[in-house]
Image (tube, rainbow, N blue to C red):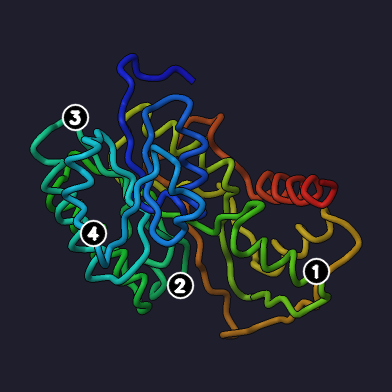
Amino acid sequence: MKENKQKERILILGGSGFIGQALYRELQSYYDVHGTYCSQIGMYADNQVYHHFCLEKHAVTLLLEKIRPTTIVFALKGPASLRLKALEKICEYVKVDSDRSVFLISSRNVFDAKTARPAYEDDIPLSISAEGKTNIALEKLVIETIPDQHTIVRLPLVLGINSPEIVHLRQCIRHHATFEIYPNLVVTAITIQQLQAQIHYMINRSFRGVFHPASENMIHHDELFREICEKIGDKTPIFKNVYSSNEDKFSALLSSKNKLPAPYCVSIEEVIQETALNETTTSLI
């Protein structure tokens, strides 16, 4: 991938999380990348590009003044009010310089009150969950305050070796424990490796707007995890079917507007294949 001639400085807020760590690994060879951590002091204390930052204790303005990033990836977890306050300060920092931007990591849960069909980029978000409502507020903030300097990345179900779902699946297989699947839930998904490549491309090309980096086709939740298990090997967890309604519900993101070039598009079959291959490789190590 051809990068910008001038090395861009990127700050990943939430750099010690599952998504943040993956983005750091993907970007650090191409950009001047910095990350933050809060509680994992023993792991990051000696890392010169990881900075101790806790929403409850530290002011984000001091961190911005110290690092002077051109791109800020906002992948923080924590109290909603503190995330909003931090993002407000970040938007103030960004809007004074047209070369600065925010990549806001959002989620499919901004649509968790609208389950009759898949969601597209221009659909109006509506949520009933606390986290979904917080993500909607964060999205609204960047749209209104830095309309030409933001990229909203709404994540579908993200799979991968260290993803919460796959870690739980692996434990259930090992202990022959119960793993809940949802036969009436329709989803899209992506692997963490595919997501890394897509966000890298967006940053390199300075894409702006709302993006749904998800598989181009959908699958029922139960079929997804049954197929992954079939490809991993003979052992399976105890699958427990959970029904929340008699009709299909959608927790699926699709793209109709901001599509990436063909090499960055993925199918649900490719997601299953890559997830199973990674798990098989892990089991051999």
Under circle 1, the secondary element is helix
For marks 4 and 3, the one nearer the N-term is 4
Q: Which amino acid does label 4 sit on?
A: His
Q: How crowded is mark 2: few (under 14 residues within 10 Å), some or many (20 or more)?
A: some
- Name the residue tied to disc 1: 173
- Residue displayed at 78% across by 78% down: 177
Give coordinates of residue 26: x percent, y percent. 51, 35
- Residue displayed at 21% across by 39% down: 66
Left/right of residue 101 with respect to residue 280 in the rendered view: left
Give coordinates of residue 15: x percent, y percent. 42, 49
For marks 2 and 1, the one nearer the N-term is 2
- Name the residue tied to disc 3: 99
Of circles 4 and 1, which is in front? 4
Q: What residue type is labelled 1?
A: Ile
The Cα atoms of the two marked residues, 2 and 1, are separated by 30 Å
Which numbered marker is on residue 58?
4
The Cα atoms of the two marked residues, 1 and 3, are separated by 48 Å
- Name the residue tied to disc 2: 115
- Residue displayed at 23% across by 65% down: 137
Q: Is residue 157 above or below residue 48?
A: below
Q: Are marks 4 and 3 in contact (CB under 8 Å)?
A: no
Q: What residue type is labelled 2?
A: Thr
Q: Do the residues labelled 1 and 3 touch (CB within 8 Å)?
A: no
Residue reaching furthest to the right? 234
Q: Are marks 3 and 2 in contact (CB under 8 Å)?
A: no
Q: Which amino acid does label 3 sit on?
A: Asp
